[in-house]
């Protein structure tokens, strides 16, 4: 149950599979993704940069935004029994994630026909619910990838949210 496959070897590995960055071919890659949910009510934006120097290491950095915008704030709609639509305002409920990624690839010492790669993505998360609440949090993902040297076969193990993505909330109800 709850299993999935993430086979990526490009800039999107910072999100799906950090060990996949070990197989990127370009010195530098840039990727952008946009998606909307529920008839454009919620928006998902993702921007990532990754690169691979010649030493077997790979790096990446991603910024993610997931938010619901234009939520009507009707808390001040009725004051002293009087309805005034001028007092209705809008706010957003938004999550931002800043995700640095590091990955490394090396040949197996005992079997030169296999190569082993691993990667880690750190997550710094900022959440804001209008003027009412903010949160800072952190988390991490990790992955291990084993391929034959011709890249015909491979096995990847990805562990998402290994730190359970801790969040520290602050509320403002004034």
Image (tube, rainbow, N blue to C red):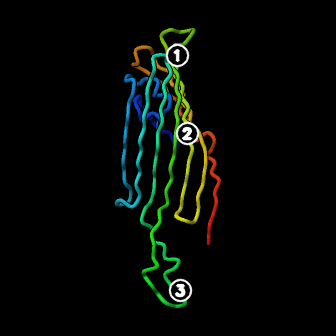
1 or 3: tag closer to the N-terminus:
3
- Classify 10 Å Cα crowding around label 1: few (below 14), some (14-19), many (20 and above): some
Q: Name the residue beneath numbered marker 2.
A: 160
Q: Secondary structure at mark 3?
A: strand
Q: Residue at x 56, y 41 (%)?
A: 123
Q: Is residue 52 left or right of residue 140?
A: left
Q: Nearer the viewer, mark 1 or mark 3?
A: 3
Q: Residue at x 63, y 48 (%)?
A: 166
Q: Is residue 113 above or below residue 83?
A: above
Seen from this angle, which residue lies furthest bottom? 81
Viewer-proximal residue among 40 and 5: 40
Callout count: 3
| x, y percent for residue 139 | 60, 42
Alpha-carbon span between mark 1 and mark 2: 23 Å
Dots 2, 3 in contact, CB < 8 A:
no
Q: Nearer the viewer, mark 1 or mark 2?
A: 1
2 or 3: tag closer to the N-terminus:
3
- Classify 10 Å Cα crowding around label 2: few (below 14), some (14-19), many (20 and above): some
Tell me the quarter of the picture where residue 31 sits.
Answer: top left
**Which of the labelled discs sits on residue 79, or is there none?**
3
| x, y percent for residue 105 | 51, 19
Q: Secondary structure at mark 1?
A: strand
Q: Nearer the viewer, mark 2 or mark 3?
A: 3
1 or 2: tag closer to the N-terminus:
1
Q: Residue at x 52, y 19 (%)?
A: 116
| x, y percent for residue 82 | 49, 90
Alpha-carbon span between mark 1 and mark 3: 67 Å
Q: Name the residue beneath numbered marker 1.
A: 106
Alpha-carbon span between mark 2 and mark 3: 47 Å
């Amino acid at each position: 149950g709850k299993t999935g496959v993430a086979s990526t070897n490009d800039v999107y590995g910072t999100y799906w599979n950090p060990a996949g960055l070990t197989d990127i071919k370009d010195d530098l890659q840039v990727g952008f993704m946009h998606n909307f949910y529920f008839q454009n009510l919620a928006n998902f934006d993702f921007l990532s940069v990754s690169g691979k120097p010649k030493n077997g290491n790979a790096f990446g950095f991603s910024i993610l935004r997931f938010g619901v915008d234009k939520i009507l704030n009707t808390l001040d709609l009725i004051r002293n029994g009087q309805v005034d639509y001028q007092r209705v305002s809008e706010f957003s409920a938004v999550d931002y994630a800043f995700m640095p990624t590091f990955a490394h690839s090396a040949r197996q010492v005992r079997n030169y026909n296999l190569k082993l790669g691993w990667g880690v993505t750190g997550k710094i998360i900022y959440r804001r619910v209008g003027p009412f609440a903010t949160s800072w949090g952190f988390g991490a993902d990790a992955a291990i990838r084993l391929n034959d040297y011709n890249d015909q076969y491979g096995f990847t193990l990805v562990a998402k949210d290994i730190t359970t993505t801790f969040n520290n909330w602050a509320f403002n109800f004034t």
